[in-house]
Every structure is written in structure tokens, then in C-alpha cells.
Image (cartoon, helix red, strand yellow):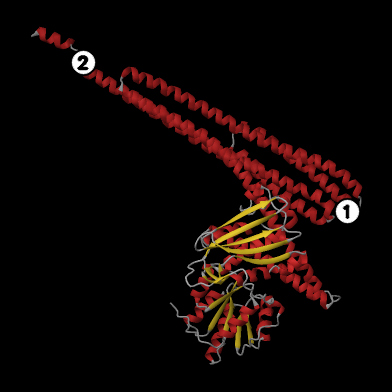
Amino acid sequence: MQKHKTKAARQPRWHLLYFVLAAFDLATVSVSLYLNHNLMGVYEEAVLSNQEWALRHGIYSELGELASETNAPGNDVFDTKDVPAESKRLHRSLGQFDLKLADARSDLQLNVKADVAAPLLRDLDKIEIAMGEMIAEAEGIFGFFQRAEGAMAGTRMATMDRKYANLTSAIARMGRQVRDIQHAKFETELAVAASLRQMEYVIASMILLMVGCVTLYGHKLSQRAKRTDAEMREYSLALEAASEEALAASQAKSEFLANMSHEIRTPMTAILGFGDLLLDPRSGEQDKSRAVQTIRRNGKQLLALINDILDLSKIESGKLELERRTCNVRALLRDVLDLFNLRAEERGLSLKSVLVGPVPATITTDTTRLKQALVNLVGNAVKFTEEGGVTLSVRAGPGPEEIRFEVSDTGLGMTHDQVERLFQPFTQADTSTTRKFGGTGLGLTITRKIANLLGGDVAVSSEFGQGSRFSITVATGSLDGVQIVGANDPNPSAQADPFSQPFPPLSIDGRVLLVEDGEDNQALLNYLLGAAGADVDLAENGQVGLEMAMDAWGRDEAYGVVLTDMQMPVMDGYTLASTLRAKGYTGQIIALTAHAMKGDIDRCLESGCDTYLSKPIDRDDLLREVHARIGQPSAFVLR
């Protein structure tokens, strides 16, 4: 019995070893998880730190931009000679600079460790001093100009430029310090991550010696650490790429805004200038007629610019809706060329259309959008052609239900690189093109997108110095029963410009209530309607219009038509229309709206209006609608 007990006591207690291994396994797993948690913490800290310092780098970049804006008046005064205006610009920019500088200093004092913030704060002090020195020089220049000492001002400008160079150098030094801080933090975080990774390898080796099954777990931890390290490096590269993209986007935005400013200010200069000429009592009838035509032409140019931007926005958002209907091909060619005949004659260019082979007389497409695309192509061809001519041709194909329009010119032509940039929004062949010929760079982008929506595309071939050829292919729709015309068939005669004709022979017999808060629009619409024979009453807002309409209706003297603007104080046009319909008003209501998007138009109709007219109001459309609807009962049924 005693012998049995001794033997039993000597047997190895494997179950205790199991518990030891289990405890060791649990400990190693816990330690590994802890290390992994710390590693992820390092990663998160790196991300947050880089975001914070990237934002600070952006603030210092804005300081550089504001410094440039503050420096500009001291240079521009040599061109403008307008000391008060340039001084005002300088102090406005200086105020923005001081606010941004105060924000940067407050951020460093509150959010950054003192030892890290100290050199940056010293640089901010240097920047502030440099800005003060530059401002002093600019004020000196202004003083010289006020005392008519232009030569002294020129001498002082060199000193101001050196002060500005000191200022920009200080700002650039801050940017370099921020990048150095970011790199140092990256190195520190990577070193911590490397140390943690080494500890994981030690633990994995111990697990391999103690128990084989833990090896797999250690391997997974190692792989996870490597992935985390790779993600950190990828994030660093992505951050740098994003910074470069942001800089490129900022430059593109600046170029676009400068281009837009030019495109808007150029026609506005003509409009305002010739408006002043109309007010000059010394102007003769010929001068006034030319002024009116110039104002109208430049107003159309501004409207076309706005329409281009809206069209591109609608196309990009997928909200451009097509209205497909029958389109006469030869009439389309005539209408497009009629728009440019006068411009081509002024430039000494030939302008013609050609039917190449048999083509369908009519196609089914969105005529308005197709015409818009062709106008863009022909307009560009005329603009960039200085001698020779422009030809608009049309041919069947290349597919069985496709038609191709080609616009060829003998103009400047383009290189291969310039052609590659053509269809990017807000860009032209090169910056010299923008400076010489103007334009927003939207036309070709819109043209290609329209062609895609119409079932085709745009192609271009060009040789520098030899001219260009643009072709737009669109779907024709079914050609069953469509007449085919040949090249020898006569072209329809050109139509006269409707604006060179007298007012359309439409008479408006009845009372019209015009609800409009703009005095200029009141005067214009009152004149157009009155000249056509209408008896017009005016209301300056929707509340007054509601009272006048209901009062006349109650006296059984209802207005034949209520014309209402949709954006007004006190009560807008939407509320006016819906309130009238809620009270049972059955007369015609026509909306006048500057918002021509689909959603805005639907809102007009849903509020109770029978139809709408988009601003700027076309004279013929206005008189035609009022003539057709005056005195007629409304077909609107309140939902």
C-alpha cells in the first residue's frame, strides 16, 4: 500500500503543466493584445496629429495669400493712382491678416506644447514685425503719391518689395518648421511602432518554445502589425498626394475665378458705359441706337454665361431633361448660321452650310440642346478664325440611325496637347487663348455632354496653323417615312432678326394686374403691356396684389391676367398664387421667375400658376402668353 502511494506521488502532474501552459498562453495573449492596442493607438495618434498640423499648415498658407493681397495695393497704386482706394484695400487686407495671425498665435498657445510652440510663436512675432515694416513702406508710397512725388514713390517701392520678401520668407520658414515637426512626429511614432513590433516578435518566439499552437497567433499579430505599418505609410503618401491635389485645385479655382471675373466685367463695362452714353444729352440718335444694341448684345453675353454654368451644373447632377421632337435639319443649319452672319461679315469670313450626300430632312431629337451644341462649335470656329471661313456640314451616319454635323475652319489650329485639354471644364487650349479671345472654357464641355445625352459624341481633328474640324454625332430616332434630301436641294432662305422688326401685331384687350417689387421691371413690363393695349394696375408685393385681385373679383371686375414675380417681400408669388386658388380664384395667373430650374418651374405650377415666363422676359413671349390667356378661365385644379 505504501509502495503504491510512493509511485503515485512520483507520477508527473501533467494537469498542472496544462494549467501553467494555459496561464502562460493567457498571459502572452493578453500582452499581445495590449501591444496591438498600443500600436493602434500610435496609428490613431499619428492620424490626429497629422490632421492638426495639416490644418495649421493651411492657416500659414492663408497668411501667405493675405500677405500677397496686403502687398498688392502698394504696387497697384502705380497703375491706378487712386491712393484712397488702394489704402482702403491695404487696410482691409491687413485686418484680415491680423485676424488670421491672432488665430494662429492663439492656436499655438492653447493647443501646442510650450517647447514646440515657442519657435513658431517667435516666427509669428517676426512675421508681425515684417508686416509692420512692409505696411510702413506702403504708407510711405501712398504719401509720396499724395504729394505728387512719383519718382520718390518708385524708389520706395523697391524697399517695400524687400520688406515683402522678408515677410514671405518668414512665412515660408514657418511652413518648413511645420513640415519638420510633422516628419519628426512621424519618425517618433514609427520608432514606437517598431519597438512594439520587436516585443511582439519576442513574445512570438517564447510562445513557439512553450507551445506550438501559440505560434499561429503570434504570426497573425505580426501580420497585423505589418499591415498597420503599411497603412500608416500609405496614409502618409495619401496625405501628401491630397496636399498636392488641394494646391492644384486651389490654383485651378483661382484661375477660374479670374476668368469668370474677366468674362463678367467685360460685358458689364460695356453695359454701364453705354448706359451712361444714353444719359448724355450730347448723344445723337445714331449714338443712342448703337448704345442700345451694344447693351443688348452684352446682356445676351452675360445671360449666355449664366446659362452655361447652370447647364453644366444640371448635366453633372443628372437633372438636365431632354425634350425630343421633330427637327428640320436644313432649318437648324440656317438658324445656327443666322446667329453668326453679321459677326462673320465684320471679320471678313465666309460662312456657309453644306449637305454632304443624302441626309434625312427631319430627325427626332432635342432641338434646343442640339442647336446649343452647334452654336458653341460654330461660335468657337468664328472666334478663332482670322481669315478664310467656316463651314457647317451635315452627313448621314456613321450608324444607321445617326447623323453627323461637322464644323471646319481655317483658323489657328491646335497641337496634340492642346486638343487633349479641350473638354476639361473651365479650361481652354492655353492661357494665351483666354487672354486674347476670352471665354469660360465651358462650351466644349457642355457640347460633349449634350452629344452624349443625345446618343452620340464629339470628335476633333486639328493641325496647328491649318485649322480645326469638330464633328458632333447624334441619334436621329426612327427614320421610317422620313424624306431624304440631297446636296442639290435649295436651302431655305434666311429669316430676318425678329428684334429688327416692329412690335408683333398682338393687341391685348383687357385688364392686367402686375405684381412686381422691382421698380425697373415694373416700368418695363408696364410699358410693353400698355403699348400692346392692356390696362395695367401695379402692386408692389404679393399682399397688395392679393387684396387688389380679390377686391376686383368680388366686384365682378376680375383681372384678365395676374402677372406675378415669385420672389418678393411681405408675400411672395408662391403664397399669392396658392392663396388665390384656396379662395376659389379662377382667373389666369402667370409666374415671372428668375429661377428656371425644373424644380423651381414645378413649384410655380404646383402653387397655382397656369404657366411661367423666365427672366429676363422675352418681349414676344410675354405678349403672346398674355394675349392668349387674358380673360380665359384657369385650367388649374387645386390638389
Find residue 354 and report its horizontal and vertical position in percent. Answer: 64, 66
Mark 1 burial class by Cα count in 10 Å: few <14, some 14-19, many 20+: some
Find residue 379 and report its horizontal and vertical position in percent. Answer: 68, 63
Tally of marks: 2
Q: Is residue 116 left or right of residue 38?
A: right
Residue placed at 82% from the left, 76% from the top? 286
Kind of element beneath mark 2: loop
Residue placed at 49% from the left, 69% from the top? 479
Q: Is residue 369 left or right of residue 468?
A: left
Q: CA distance from mark 1 to mark 2?
A: 104 Å
Out of 276 and 295, give the one closest to the viewer: 295
Q: In which quadrant of the rendered view does residue 10 lie?
A: top left
Q: Is residue 507 left or right of residue 597?
A: right
Q: In which quadrant of the rendered view does residue 437 lie?
A: bottom right
Instruction: Pick out the residue farthest to the bottom.
Output: 556
Residue type marked 1: Gln
The answer, for residue 576, to whether it is visible in the render is no
Instruction: Pick out the residue farthest to the top.
Output: 3
Residue of label 1: 146
Q: In which quadrant of the rendered view does residue 537 lie?
A: bottom right
Q: Earlier in the sequence, mark 1 or mark 2?
A: 2
Residue of label 2: 13
Residue type marked 2: Arg
Instruction: Pick out the residue farthest to the left.
Output: 1
Residue placed at 65% from the left, 78% from the top? 619
Find residue 16 and report its horizontal and vertical position in percent. Answer: 23, 18
Out of 421 and 49, give the one closest to the viewer: 421
Kind of element beneath mark 1: helix
In what quadrant of the picture does the C terminus appear?
Answer: bottom left
Residue placed at 53% from the left, 83% from the top? 588
